[in-house]
Image (tube, grey):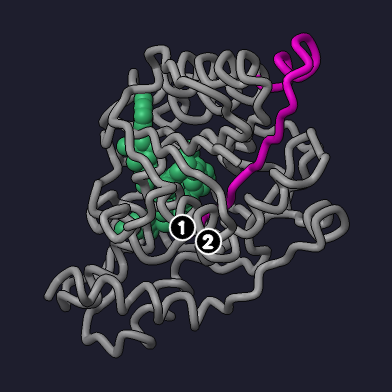
Amino acid sequence: MKTIVTGGAGFLGSHLCDLLLARDHEVICVDNLITGNERNISHIGSDRFKFIKHDISKPLYIKGKVDFIYHLASPASPIDYQEFPIQTLKVGALGTHNMLGLAKEKNARFFLASTSEIYGDPLVNPQPEEYWGNVNPIGPRGVYDEAKRFAEAITMAYNRYHRVDTRIIRIFNTYGPRMCPNDGRVVPNFIGQALRGEDITVYGDGSQTRSFCYVSDEVEGIYRLMMSDYTLPMNIGNPEEHTILEFAKIIVRITGTRSKIAFQNLPVDDPKQRRPDITKARNILGWEPKVSLEHGLKETIKYFKCMVE
Ligand code: NAD
Ligand code: UDP
């Protein structure tokens, strides 16, 4: 089974490469390293693994057959996509178009990594797949949200018009080892601050909520969805919802830090609540998260401790 993973040198993509190699796939990882790092794949010694440094917003030509394409390439943290707004729009639009074209040419199954951000600042909680969302197209997060919404639309168009076999996942906040320590996301920020004894920066009053899924659960959900025959978008995430202030206190407790909590301004358009409705994942894939927040955070803290040493 020859499988392409775009964004395979990123946080999630590198864990997906590990899982696919363990399940006997031949893996071609395609990444331009704009937010990823070769360090994330340097442990892989398999001769079934190949890395190609390439910007998939430009066409990609691969010789021979391809069976599966997992398309994960895109800046993913609010700091990253605001630093690279045009690249984010291009990879969501042109990159997705290129990878769908490759899937059509090779008769490969195509998988789009979409996001809970397509729900924007949701007015419905938890969010079921049927909810259309509440997105500000021209706000600072619009470059990411609208790129992913376009990516979903073109994926469904290739599915319906060209009969390409497609899957769409909506990933909710996922964390774990290999997250980039300075991408500004809440998990690396809080853990890094706690380990350095700095103030923990809670934005706003910390009453906004998020639901955190450990990476091994997320990649298992990704794989199961790809292997299913379900072609409409599916939420994969952990439905256990926490306020960000609660989350900061959990990090303080687990790390045993003396850091204090410091409140800072809430970023523009920061979603007030986010929690997946995973009824479909449970019923169709028999999937639900297994790793507790406590255990997942301990593993992640271990990784960040090694990084600072
Ligand atoms: P990441 O930044 O660690 O990984 C993204 C990878 O894509 C990086 O290695 C980057 O270099 C690569 N990339 C970006 N543009 C590219 C291009 N034009 N050509 C080739 N490679 C390119 O982020 P992540 O958290 O691993 O996210 C992976 C995917 O999952 C993204 O599509 C993201 O939108 C989606 N997602 C992640 C989360 C999460 O919580 N981690 C939540 C929702 C959706
Ligand atoms: N956040 C925070 N302090 C930080 C980083 C993030 O309070 O140092 C908040 C952020 O405002 C948001 C939540 O944590 O409400 C999750 O932010 P993240 O950037 O991880 O991802 P998002 O879910 O917003 O895409």
Task: Give the answer, above or below, for where 256 lies relative to 54.
Answer: below
Residue 18, disc: 1
In which quadrant of the rendered image does the C terminus lie? bottom left
Residue 120 appears at what percent x and percent y? 58, 37
Find out whether residue 166 is within the magenta segment.
yes
Q: Residue at x 35, y 53 (%)?
A: 185
Residue 125 is left or right of residue 180, and the answer is right
The answer to the question of whether label 1 and label 2 lie on touching residues, with beta carbons closer than 8 A, is: yes
Looking at the image, which residue is at 31% across and 62% down?
Answer: 188
Which image quadrant: the N terminus? top right
- Taking the image in four quarters, ligand 1 sits in the one at top left
Return the x and y of residue 133 as percentages of the image width and height.
Answer: 68, 34
* Residue 22 badge: 2
The answer to whether residue 140 of the structure is visible from this angle is yes
Q: Quadrant of residue 7?
A: top left
Magenta span contains residue 141: no
Is label 1 within 8 A of ligand 1 (CB to nearest ligand atom)?
no
Residue 282 appears at what percent x and percent y? 81, 60
Residue sitting at the far left: 309
Residue type highlighted by circle 1: Asp
Q: Which residues are magenta?
A: 155-174
* Crowd tier of the residue under label 1, counting other residues whose Cα lies within 10 Å: few below 14, some 14–19, many 20 or above: some
- Residue at 43% across, 24% down: 143
**Within 10 Å of the Cα at label 2, are there few (<14), some (14-19), or many (20+) other Cα atoms?**
few
Q: Residue at x 27, y 36 (%)?
A: 33
Q: From what the image shows, is residue 11 above or below residue 193?
A: above
- Residue 270 at least partly seen: no
